[in-house]
Amino acid sequence: MVEGHSVHRVASRHKLKLVGKKFQASSPNGRFADGAAAITEKEFVSIEAVGKNLFAWFGKGDQEVCVHVHFGMAGNWAVFEEDEAEPATTPTTRLRLECSGVVAHLSAMTVAHGSREGLYLPKRSKLGEDPLRADADPERLWKKVSASKKSIGALVMDQSAFCGPGNIYRAEILFKAGVHPDRPGKSLTREEFDSVWSHTVDLLRRGYATGSILTVDDADQVKYGDLRRYIYNKAHCPKCLTRIVSWEIASRTAYACPSCQPMAADAVPQTESAVPSTPKKTKSNKDAVLSTPEPKSKKRGAEPTQSSSAKRQHVPFPSHCVRDSLADRLANPAKLTVKELKAVLRERGHPTDGLKAVLVARLAISLDGTPPPMRSAEDAAADKARAGENKAVEHIAELHPTQTTKARGRRL
């Protein structure tokens, strides 16, 4: 998912590259044909980001048109200037803008057009507090959080409350604040809420500046090594080495360190522990499952105070959002794809038959006691790009895939 910091970067880039110009507009895939016709030859007047939403304004007065954009999982709004070749449009290209010396391609999950009263104001009224905007009101957010039975983990992802953070940010914000994601909003003290909001502002500002979701403090980089994030898709907490647990909140994976983010005593039934000391094993999952008691609702449809999903010791997966280098993934074979597992096993002279779990176990035995593989020059160059030493393109909403590939050197 393209998160709030990346959307703000697109807005800032387009204020420099596109605003003030008049464009010939078209819809290559035909899904925004009416909108393109409505804005063609009109001046691109302004653009603003609100969380994960972009609002672009074309024309003035009675001719004013608002274009609303939500990128979804992997959209982008790329700009090609006269010194770079324009790539062919794709089946996802909803809008193409062209004027002298500049072309822009927009691919996104949602692209809609309308008026200020008919589109912008209704959409804007449903959005919460954006930590990257000057008009963010933490007092208004505190009133909403302190009155809510929803878990703080759900609220951080609720764009009518915290506007901008996504799943990676949720894991890292709540870890840094020491707040368990299952805590009901109304159970947070003002001090705890202030800590959550402070880390939300700090991390999204850092993401805006670097173009990447980097959450580890400088002192912890020195202490724990080269980390980009603390617990998102990690097996162990870097601070206390406790196993990270994961579970579902509204169909998205949540993460927590049971030691650094304990459940408050008043947030769970007094006779139960939020994280049992002896994990319970299930037939369907060989990993230990950490069960959180499920509070009984007083009436059908009542808002639950906790997630209904059981907690489990987290096994890192090959994330498409946060891609590790091959060398990093070899250190944890579960992150490798089946194709990669078979390739590595084949190179080592081992059988390549069996399901992924068998391949992972086979490779883990093979790697045990051997030195880690040397990172290739190609991987090292890609790591530098990924870490923002050249162009920060970990999240690609600003760039076309061809531009991203060129900036990174190669895909990992």
Image: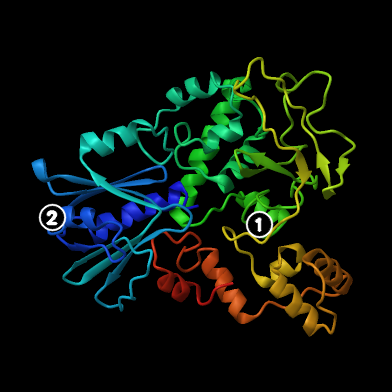
- Helix or strand or loop: what does disc 2 sit on? loop
Q: Is residue 223 found left or right of 402 in the rendered image?
A: right
> Which numbered circle lies on residue 365?
none
Q: Is residue 291 found left or right of 250 in the rendered image?
A: right
- Helix or strand or loop: what does disc 1 sit on? loop
Nearest the viewer among 174 and 90 is: 90
The CA span between labels 2 and 1 is 47 Å
Can you say whether 387 is above or below 149 in the image? Answer: below
Q: What residue do we see at 48% from left, 35% from top?
A: 162
> Around disc 2, counting alpha carbons within 10 Å, would you say few (fewer than 14), some (14 to 19), or many (20 or more)?
many
How far across and down, in percent of the image, does residue 266 sit? 72, 18
Can you say whether 251 is above or below 412 in the image? Answer: above
Can you say whether 392 is above or below 121 in the image? Answer: below
Q: Residue tagged by mark 2?
A: 42
Q: What residue do we see at 43% from left, 69% from top?
A: 401
Nearest the viewer among 309 and 124 is: 309
How far across and down, in percent of the image, does residue 94 sit? 32, 60
Q: Mark 2 belongs to which amino acid?
A: Lys
Q: Quadrant of the C terminus?
A: bottom right
Mark in front: 2 vs 1: 2
Q: Residue tagged by mark 1?
A: 227
Q: What residue do we see at 63% from left, 21% from top?
A: 187
Residue 99 is at least partly visible in this image = yes
Displayed quadrant of residue 13: bottom left
Q: Earlier in the sequence, mark 2 or mark 1?
A: 2
Q: Mark 1 belongs to which amino acid?
A: Leu
